[in-house]
Amino acid sequence: GCEQNNIPYGVYLYSYADTIAKAKSEAAHVLRLVKGHRLSYPIYYDLEDNYILNHTTAKQRQKIAETFTSIIKKAGYSVGIFAPKSWFEKELPIAAFNKWDKWVAHWNTKCTYQGNYQMWQATNKGNISGIIGPVDINFLMLPKTNINLKLSSKKKVQVSWNQKSKGIKIQIFYSTKKNKGYKKAATINSSKGKAAFNISPRYIPETAFSNRCFPRLPEMASTVSSTVVRN
């Protein structure tokens, strides 16, 4: 797992809570599962199930999120909200949800969400060497990072960035019109400040900082009607 391989990680819980009582139960469930583990990233509350959307108001969803996050934060963990871009724009009260870190799911070559966010889920059709089948690709958005791209030939791209300390890795992904998912091109120590790699002609390069892992926590049987594994 992540801890055995020294990979920084966080976790998320796919929520089915449509009441404050269920949100309390989900928070207690998460704390039981993470007890004794060393999380490097926040615990994210995944709000995207249509059942919640159809059985709660925006104000109720705010109260549910406040209940879950306050319990997690009180236990000493960082906490954030995962949701599709459309939910952050239309279904979750903007002013209330701005107080939490946001992980925005927008399957596109560019995240067009206009608010502040810390992570972006760009696709569910990523390709990672050593993993069979498509995977989600997520980008951690770091401030004050200048990324420069240069096409040195028809198939070769040079990427440079402001150098960072040792121990931080740059993961470079790219997409093509033929393959709309993201494919990993390289993992480079950030202190090098540059990388070059070969790709197919039409490309849209993207970069992500640091290796990270976000396993999905198992839901409680009492609140599960179906299971859809996203990561």
Image (cartoon, rainbow, N blue to C red):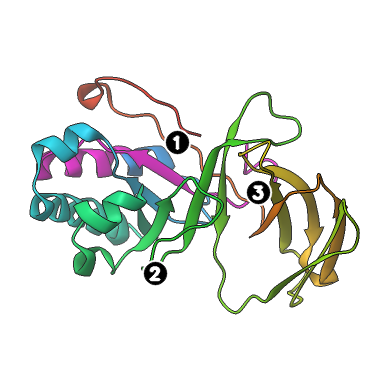
What is the total number of numbered labels drawn onto the structure image?
3
Label 1, on which residue?
216
| Residue kind at label 3, given as amino acid type | Ile
One can see residue 35 in this view: no
- Residues at circles 3 and 2 in contact by the CB criterion of under 8 Å: no
In the image, farthest residue toward the right: 153
**Amino acid residing under circle 1:** Arg
Picture layout, residue 89 above or below residue 19: below
Q: Residue at x 55, y 59 (%)?
A: 140
Quick check: is 15 in the magenta stretch? Answer: yes
Q: Earlier in the sequence, mark 1 or mark 3?
A: 3
Magenta span of residues: 1-29
Label 3 to label 2, Cα distance in Å? 26 Å
Q: Which residue is mark 2?
A: 116
- Identify the secondary structure beneath mark 1: loop
* 132 is within the stretch colored magenta: no
Task: Give the SS element for disc 2.
Answer: loop
| Amino acid, disc 2 | Asn
Looking at marks 3 and 2 on the same chain, the residue that comes earlier in the sequence is marked by 3
Quadrant where the N terminus sits is: top right
Q: Which residue: 56% across, 52% down?
A: 109
108 sits to left or right of 188 = left
Q: Residue 214 versus residue 70: which sits nearer the camera?
A: 214
Residue 7: give its label: 3
Q: Residue at x 20, y 38 (%)?
A: 25
